[in-house]
Amino acid sequence: GAVVSQHPSRVICKSGTSVKIECRSLDFQATTMFWYRQFPKQSLMLMATSNEGSKATYEQGVEKDKFLINHASLTLSTLTVTSAHPEDSSFYICSAHLAGKVGTEAFFGQGTRLTVV
Amino acid sequence: DQQVKQNSPSLSVQEGRISILNCDYTNSMFDYFLWYKKYPAEGPTFLISISSIKDKNEDGRFTVFLNKSAKHLSLHIVPSQPGDSAVYFCAASGNAGNMLTFGGGTRLMVKP
C-alpha cells in the first residue's frame, strides 16, 4: 500500500518555542493531506485539511495562527506548532489519500508525540 | 455532537473466538465507512472498508457489516488472535471529500 512518512516521531520542546512536523507521501502524490490530533484515550480529531498550493482549511476551534500548515508540494505537508504551550502536548497524525480518488482509505503517518515542557 | 460513536470503550475476547466491534453514526450523508487498527504511539492502519451501496464486505478474518437503516456498522474478526489486540476505530466519510470522522475507539484485548 501507499506509504506516508511523518517526522519526527517524538519531540520535546520548551514552552514558547515552535515545532515543525513533516508529513511526506513517499510513493504517491497527495493533493490533499489531513492533520489529526489525538488526546490520551480519545479519538482522532481532524484539525485541518492541507491543500497543495493553497491555504489550509481549519476545523472549528483550531487556531490557524497557532497551527501553521504549509503544503508546498504534492508530496509534503508541514504542521508548525507556534509558541507551543504544555496544553499543546498531544499526538499529531497526518494522512493522505491517493490523488483524485475520493472515498478511499487514508494512509496515515506514524504520528508525532509532542511534549511541551 | 458525535457523529460517529463506538459505545464500547473496551472488549475482551478469548483467542479463537469471534470479536464483534460496533459503531453507530448519525449523519445520513456518510457513504463510505472504514475500520482502522491502532497501536499506541503509532498511526492507524487501514483494515477494511465498505461503501454504502453494500451491506457486507469480507477480507480474510475481517468482515464488516453495514445496516444503513439502523445507521450501524460492525466489524467481525474470526478467529481472534492475540496480535489483534489494539484499539479499533471506525471512521466515516461523505460527499464533502476524503476527510474522516472517527469514532471514539474500542480497545480489543484477545486473551491467549
Image: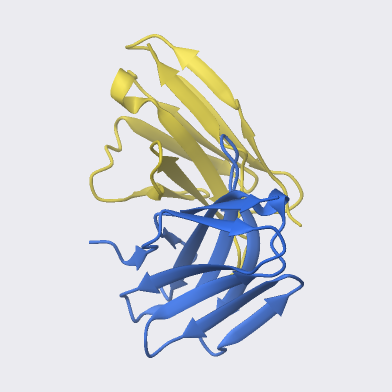
Q: Nearer the viewer, residue B17 or B101?
A: B17
- Residue beneath the point at 28% across and 62% down: B2
Q: Residue at x 60, y 85 (%)?
A: B56
* Residue A27 in the image, given as x and y percentages of width and height: 77, 50
Looking at the figure, which quarter contains the N terminus of chain A? bottom right
Question: Is residue B89 rendered to the left or right of residue A64?
Answer: right
Q: Quadrant of the C terminus of chain A?
A: top left
Q: Write down which chain is painted blue.
A: B
Residue at image point 40% right, 36% down: A40
| Towards the viewer: A55 or B2 | B2
Q: Residue at x 57, y 89 (%)?
A: B54
- Examine the rendered structure and indicate whether residue A19 appears above or below residue A48: above
Color encoding of the figure: by chain
Give the percent coordinates (x, y) of residue A5. Answer: 67, 39
| Figure chain in yellow | A
Q: Position of residue A87 (x, y in %)?
A: 29, 25
Q: Is residue B97 above or below residue A19?
A: below
Residue A15 in picture, x, y percent from top left: 34, 11
